[in-house]
Image (cartoon, rainbow, N blue to C red):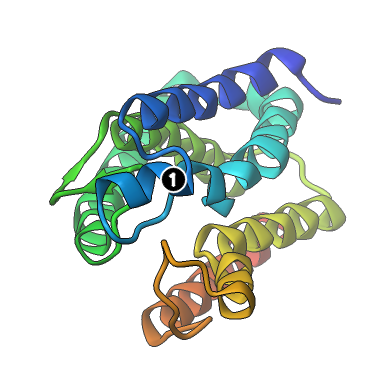
Amino acid sequence: MFSKTWLVVFVVPVLLQGMFAYRDDFFTPTDVLFRQTYGLPFLYHGGMWSDVFLFAPLMAYIIDTHGGTWEWKLLFIALAFGLAASYAMHMYLYVPGGMKIPEAHTHDGMLTTAGWIHLFYMTAGIAVLVLFYLAPSIHSPAEVWTVSGLLFLHFVIGTHVPFKIWVAIRNPIWYPTGPIVDLPTAFTLGGLAAALIGLSLWATR
C-alpha cells in the first residue's frame, strides 16, 4: 500500500525549501560564489534529493500501512518528541555546522527560511518513525529491517558522504575538500546504526 496524498505532503515542503533557497541566493554553485567563497547550494544537497525520492515515499508507505492503528495520544507525544529532537538537531548541529560551511538551510549563525521548514519537516518525520518502531502495530521482520536499511542509506546521503566523494574527485571551487567521513560523521552514522538496530529488534520482538 502506498499513499499518494502523504507522498505529496512530504514532497511539497522540500520544494518549498528549494524555492526559499532560490530566493536566498543559495540554490546553485553560482549563487554561492556570488555570495561568498564557498558553501553547499541546495541543488547539491544530497539529503534534499533523498528526501524526495527515498524519505518521502517511505513516510507515505509507513503512514498508509500503519497510521490507522496509531492512537491520538501517542501521535501527540511523538510529535512533541519529534519537535524537541528536530529543534535540538538544527540548533546544536546544523547551525554550528553552517558557520563552518554555509548552506541553504543555515548560514550567518542562524537558520534560513528553508532551514525552519526543514525543522518542522523533520519534526513530522521523526514522529512517524517513533510511532513506526514503538507504537503497537503488526510488523514483519522483513518490513522493519527494510525500513531501517533504507533509513540508514538516507542518513549516509544526508551526511554528505556521496557528495564528499564527488568533491574529492572533482574539487569544485565552491566547496572545500576534506575527509569523506570525518570523526563527527563517523560517530553520527555509528550512533544512528546502533539506534536503528535497537529499534528494529524492539519492533520485531
* Residue at image point 43% right, 83% down: 178
Q: Quadrant of the C terminus?
A: bottom right
Q: Mark 1 points at which residue?
A: 30
Q: Which of 24 and 174 is in front in this view?
A: 174
**Number of numbered discs visible in the structure rendering:** 1
- Residue at the (65%, 35%) spot, across then down: 52
- Element on which disc 1 rests: helix
Residue 110 picture location, percent across and down: 16, 44
Give the quadrant of residue 57. top right
* Residue 33 place in picture, x, y as percent: 35, 52
> Residue 197 lies in what quarter of the image?
bottom right
Looking at the picture, does residue 42 appear above or below residue 161?
A: above
Q: Which residue is drawn at 32% across and 37% down?
A: 115
Q: Is residue 139 left or right of residue 188?
A: right
Position of the N terminus by quadrant: top right
Against 61, is 195 above or below?
Answer: below
Residue 41 point in image, percent of width and height: 44, 47
Q: Where is residue 172 in the image (x, y as percent from the top left)?
A: 51, 67
Q: How crowded is mark 1: few (under 14 residues within 10 Å), some or many (20 or more)?
A: few
